[in-house]
Amino acid sequence: MRFAVLVFPGSNCDIDAVKAVEDVLGEPVDSVWHTETDLSQYDCVIVPGGFSYGDYLRSGAVASLSPVMGAVKEHAAAGKLVIGICNGFQILTETGLLPGVLRHNDHLQFRCEISELRVENTDTAFTNDYEKGQVIRIPIAHGEGNYFADQATIDQLKANNQIVFTYHGTNPNGSIENIAGICNEQGNVLGMMPHPERAVHELLGSADGKAMFTSIFRTWGEKHGA
Amino acid sequence: MMIAKIHVTLKGSVLDPQGTTITKSLNSLGYDEVRDVRIGKYMEVKIDTTDRKIAEERVTEMCEKLLANTVIEKYEFELVEA
Amino acid sequence: MMIAKIHVTLKGSVLDPQGTTITKSLNSLGYDEVRDVRIGKYMEVKIDTTDRKIAEERVTEMCEKLLANTVIEKYEFELVEA
Amino acid sequence: MRNEPTPQQIAEEKIYRTFGLNDEEYARILELMGRQPNYVETGIYSVMWSEHCSYKSSRPVLKKFPTSGPHVLQGPGENAGIIDIGDNLAVSFKIESHNHPSAIEPYQGAATGVGGIIRDVFTMGARPIALLNSLRFGSIEGDGAENVRNRYLFGNVVAGIAGYGNCIGIPTVGGEVVFDERYTHNPLVNAMCVGIMTHDEIAKGFASGVGNPVLAVGARTGRDGIHGATFASTEDPHSKERSAVQVGDPFMEKLLLEACLELIATGEVVGIQDMGAAGLTSSSSEMAARAGSGIELDMLKVPRREEGMTSYELMLSESQERMLVVMKKGREHIAEEILSKWGLEAAVIGRVTDDGMLRLKEGDETVCEINVSTLVDDAPVYHRPSARPAYLDETLAFDPAAVAVPSDLTETLHQLLRTPTIASKEYVYQQYDYMVRTSTIVRPGSDAAVVSIRGTRKALAMSTDGNGRYVYLNPRVGGQHTIAESARNLVCSGAKPLAVTDCLNYSSPEKPEIFYQFEESCAGISEACVALGTPVISGNVSLYNQTNDIDIYPTPIIGMVGLIEDTDHITTQEFKGAGHPVLLVGPQTTGAIGGSEYLKVVHGKVAGDAPALDLTVEKALQDAVLTAIQSGLVLAAHDLAEGGLAVALAESAIGGKLGATINFASGQRLDEALFGEAGSRIVIEADQANLDALERIFNENGVPFAVIGETGGDRLTIKINGEAAIDEAVEHLEATWRGAIPCLMK
Ligand SMILES: Nc1ncnc2c1ncn2[C@@H]1O[C@H](COP(=O)(O)OP(=O)(O)O)[C@@H](O)[C@H]1O
Ligand SMILES: [Mg+2]
C-alpha cells in the first residue's frame, strides 16, 4: 500500500505523519510537494497538520487552491482514501471535499492537550479497528477547530452517519454537536482535528491512534486481496 | 491603479464568538452601553488596471475563490481610483 | 441605538505578513494585476445611546483601550443611527 | 539627495549623542578613523558599540565563565554554542532576551524574540527541536491599573510565544513563570531554542575567501526596528520611538528555516549568520571580524520593502526573518534555486574582501568605509565601579523569630499553591503546541522537559531556571543556586547535565550596587558551573531593566541541557503507585526561611539570606540520584524549590492523583521544616525492595537521606515529630493549584 503525505509551505506535521505510517505499518510513504498534479500511484493521501501559508486570512484557505488539491479531488472521486488531520481537515473543508467550516475556538486560545474522543462510526475504512462507542485518547493542538455547519448540513451528517469522532467529556473548542471528525457521504474522505499520528507510541502518552493506521491498511488489504 | 476596499463579514445567522467575547470585555470595562459587537475583515487590494468593469469581475472572483468563505461569510466591496 | 463602524488597520510601515502572503497567492492564481494587499479588521459595535458626541468619545476610548493595538495599528470609525 | 546631517553637523551639534554615543566614545571614533564619520558611519558605530552588541559593561565579567570541556564543540562567540552528545550527533542551544520590545508590544515582542532565537540555532546548521522560555511579570493579583496591565502583558506574551512557535512547528516544551512586583514595568521575556545536527552539518558565521559573494536571504528589509539595539540598551524604552516595534512572520521563518538547512546541507555555504539586533550592520561586520576579512556591499542591491530607503536605514533596520550568507564563488545560483523553491529571495549584495574594511557603496559612490576590527575589537570596555548594596545589611539582619508560625499550616499550603508563581502553569503551556515533531516524552509540568532523539535510545532533558529573589538577597549564593537548581531538575528527569546557556537580566550597570549584583552573581554561576561540570556555551545580557527607579531583581536565567543515555531512565515527578516509601535525599534540615516564597507570600517579607547551598553536597547529591535513577531504583523524583518540602510533596501527589502519609522528626520550627528552601534536596519515591540498594548508593556518595513516609490513599498528611501539621485531600490541593491562574485571568 502506498501513502502520500502532502507538504505545503508551512506544513509542520508532515514528518510526524510519515513517521507514523513507517512505524505503525512499515508501508512505503512519500512526501509530496504542493505543486504535484498526479497522485495516481497512491492509495491513501494524508493532508497533514501545521500552518499552511501561515494560516493567514483563514486556515487552509490558500492551500486549498494549490495544484495538488486538484489531484486530491480526483483521487477522492476515484474512491481512494484521503485523511485530513487538523490543518488538513481545514484544507479539505475549504476545498469543499468535506462540508462545513472550522472556526476560531470559542475561547479564542490555541489549545494543546490529550483529548478524549468517542468513536461514533466504525464502518469507515479509517475506524473499523475501533469498537463503536470506544473512548480513545488522541492529542489536539489547534486554534481553529470549532466545527460549524448549518442545521441542514448537520442533519445530513447525522442521517448518513458521517460524524466519525466526537469529543468525550469537555468540548475543547465549542464545535457543534461536539464534532471532532467527519467523513464524506461515500466514507472515503475523513477530516479530523485531533492528531492520530501523535498517538502511536506509549512513550508519547497514548498509542490509541495506531488503530487508525491499521484500519486503513486492513481495509485496503481486504479490497486488494493483499 | 485602483484599490478595492473589501468588507468580509459573517452572515447574519452565524454566531460570532469573537464578537461576543469583545462585547463582554467592553461591558466589564464599564462600557455598559455596548449591546453587540460583530467582527469582520477589511482588505485593501491594490490592482493595476483602469477598467472598472473588468476590475469588478476580477475582484468578485477573488472574493469567491479566496478572500471570503461563502459558507459563513458575505462580502462587499467598492473600487476607488488610487 | 447607534452603530460604530470601525476600521482597524496596520500602520503604514508595519509589516503585514498576511497581506504579503495573500498578494503572492492571488498572483499565483493568475491575478497578476494585484500589486498589494493589506489586511485589517472591521468591527460593528452597537451602542445604546442617542448622544452622538458622547458616543464619539466613548468609541474613541474603546478603540484606544481594547479594539486597536495603537502601537502598531491605527483606527477610524463612523457612527450611524440604527 | 539625502537629507542627512553632515559630518561637521554631527560633530558640532553633538548629534551622535542622540544615537547613544557619549563624547569620549565619539572622540575615540575620530581617533580610530582619522576623520569625522558621516551619518551612516556614526549610526554603525553607535549600534556596534551599544551595550546590546558590544557587551561593553559585561565583557570583563563574562570572560570569567568556564567555557570549555571535552564535549564543547563551540563555546560563546558564535550565534549559538554546540556540544557533542556522541553518535556523531551535536546539540546547539542558546537563550536570548526580548524584554524591552515585550514591554511595549507584548505579543509581537515575545513572538519576535522566539523568531530570533530560532534563527540563531538553525544558523549553526542545527534542526531546531525544542523551545523553552522564562518569564517574569509584576503581580497579576488585584484590580489596580498595574495588575490589569500585568495581566495584559502576561496574556499577550504567552500568546505571542505560542503564535510564533506553534506556527513554525517547533514544540515549546518547558519554561517557567514568576510573578513579583519588581517586574511590573519590566517584564522579562527570555526564549531558548535547542537544535540537533550531525557533526558535519555544523555551520558558522565566517565571511572568508576573497571574492566570495555575500547574499541577503529571506525577508526584504523595511523600516522597522531601526536602532532596536540601542533602544534595548537605554533606560526607558517607553519614551522611544514606538515604530521601532517589529512584527514577526513565523510562516516566512518556517520557509527560511527549511531553505537554510537545505542550503547548508549542499556544502556550498562558506558562512551564515542571522540578521538580529543591528541587522545588516552587525551580521556583516561580525562575520568579517571572525574571518579577519572585509566586506563590500552595494546598498542599491539590498532587497527592500519600501521605496526611498537610505543606506543608513538599510544598515540599521531590524526587520525580521533575514539572513546573511556567504557562498562559494560561482555557487550563488544554488542559493537562488533553493530559496526560490521555498518562495523566497536571495540577492547577491556584495563580496568578501581582504582589506579588513566594511565598505558600503551606492553604485559607484562609497558611502561608508570603516575598519571592521574597530567596530568589533576596539569597542569600548567599561570596568564599572562596584559597591556592596546597602540594603543587604538590612535584609541580612532579618530574624525569623520576628514572624510567627501560622496556626493552620494546611491553609498555608493552600495559600502557597494558590500563589501564581507556584500554581499550575497549565494556562500557559496548554497554549503551546508541545507535541509537534512527536518526540516530546516529558511534557511541560515536570522538573525538566525530555525530548527523544529519533534513531537512538538517547533523549535530551532541558529546563530554564532562575530565582531573582535569592540573587537579590545574596548575589553570590543566588548565582550558585540558579545553576544548581537547573542541574538538579535535569538529574531528576534522569539526565546528566552537560552545558549551560545564560540570560543575564539586570538593571543599570552604571549603578555600582547593580554592578556588584552582576559581578557577584556571575562569580557564583561560574563556581557552580565548575563544581557541577557544566560549562557556559552561549548566552545573552539584558541590562537597564528598570523604570522609575525600581530595579528588577538581579535575574540571571539559566537554560541547561542534559543527556539521557537511555529512554528507560526517564523519570518524572508524580507519584506512581500506593505503598511505596518516600525518601528525602540531601540535607535533612533546611536552614532558615530567609528568601523563601513562604516568607514573601505569607508574611509579605523579602528578607534574610538566600537559602543555604553547599556545592560539594550538591554535586554528591546529583551524582547519587542520577546513579540511582540509571540503576532503575527510582519511581519518581522531584527537586525541592519554591515552597520547600510541603509544596514538592503536594506537586508529586497532585500529578499522580495519589496521596501520601509523611512523618519525620525535626528540631526546626514547623514552617522552616515544611516551607524552607535549602538547596540540594530531592524527594524520591521507590519500591520497598530497592531501599537497600538505594542506601548503598547514597552512603557511597556520602549523601544523607531518610525515609519520611509512604505513598497511598487520597490525602496528603504530613506529621512532624508525630504531630499532624498538614492534612488535606489531594483533590482539594489540586483544585487550588490548578484553578489559581485561570481564575485570575478570567
Ligand atoms: N513559560 C512556560 N512555558 C512552558 N512551560 C512552562 C512555563 N512555565 C512553567 N512551565 C512548566 O511548568 C512546570 C513547573 O514549572 P516550575 O514551577 O517553574 O518548575 P521548577 O520549579 O521545577 O523549575 C515545568 O515543567 C515547566 O516546564
Ligand atoms: Mg524543579
Image: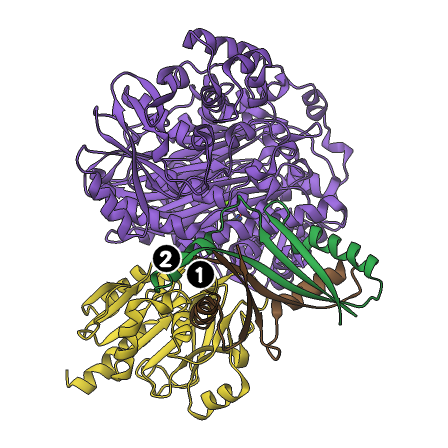
Chain colours: A yellow, B brown, C green, D purple
Residue D267 in which image quadrant: top left
Give the chain letter at badge 1. A
Note whether residue D638 is visible.
Answer: no
Residue D404 in which image quadrant: top right
Relative image position of residue D721 (x, y in whole percent): 64, 46
Q: Which of marks 1 and 2 is nearer the N terminus?
A: 2
Asked if A207 appears above or below A166 in the picture, the reply is above
Relative image position of residue D481 (x, y in whole percent): 52, 32
Along the viewing direction, whichever of B47 and D16 lies nearer the viewer: B47
Secondary element at image label 1:
helix
Relative image position of residue C48 (x, y in whole percent): 80, 68
Along the viewing direction, whichever of A80 and D374 lies nearer the viewer: D374
Look at mark 2 in the image and give the residue it sits on.
Answer: A10
Number of labels in the image equals 2
Q: Which residue lies furthest to the front in this view?
A: B51
Residue flagged by tag 2: what amino acid is it? Gly
Residue flagged by tag 1: what amino acid is it? Asp
Callouts 1 and 2 close, C-beta under 8 Å: yes
Q: Residue at horizontal 63%, vertical 50%?
A: C74
- Badge 2: residue crowd in 10 Å (few <14, some 14–19, many ≥20): many
Along the viewing direction, whichever of A20 and D398 lies nearer the viewer: A20
Q: Residue at horizontal 61%, vertical 48%?
A: D154
Q: In which quarter of the image is the N terminus of chain A?
A: bottom left
Horizontally, is D421 left or right of D145 in the view?
left
Look at mark 1 in the image and give the residue it sits on.
Answer: A55
Q: Quadrant of the C terminus of chain A?
A: bottom left
